[in-house]
Image (spheres, rainbow, N blue to C red):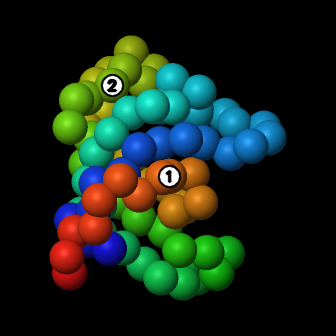
Amino acid sequence: MVGSVIRYIGLPKGELYRNFVGHVGYISHFTPVAQSDGKPRLTVQWFEPLPYHGRPVRTSHFALERFEVLSDGGK
């Protein structure tokens, strides 16, 4: 998964991070089973920083379920 290009699509219901929807980045770290909830989680590096609370965000941490995988990182 590391190196894969992904797009944020959010959750089908109750999406809290609407300003992230459509942004593209790559996976820099992947955890197959998070201790907090057992879901696959990742760290994403955004290709274009996006504003969040008035500051540019370059890195985010989310569950994999919020993303569409666009290309395999080959790792």
User: In this rendering, would 46 be left or right of 54?
Assistant: left
Q: Is residue 22 above or below residue 24?
A: above
Q: Quadrant of the C terminus?
A: bottom left
Provide the residue designation for mark 1. 67
Q: Is residue 38 above or below residue 43?
A: below
User: In this rendering, would 66 be left or right of 8?
Assistant: right
User: In this rendering, would 14 be left or right of 23?
Assistant: right
- Percent across and percent down for residue 14 are 78, 38
Provide the residue designation for mark 2. 50
Q: Quadrant of the N terminus?
A: bottom left
Q: Nearer the viewer, residue 61 or 64?
A: 64
User: In this rendering, would 64 be left or right of 36?
Assistant: left
Q: Nearer the viewer, residue 22 or 71?
A: 71
Please state which amino acid type lies under the numbered disc 2: Leu
**Measuring 64% from the left and 81% from the top, which residue is drawn there?**
38
Q: Are marks 1 and 2 in contact (CB under 8 Å)?
A: no
Residue 59 disc label: none
Please state which amino acid type lies under the numbered disc 1: Phe
- Percent across and percent down for residue 41 are 49, 68
Q: Nearer the viewer, residue 51 or 64?
A: 64
**Residue reaching furthest front?**
71
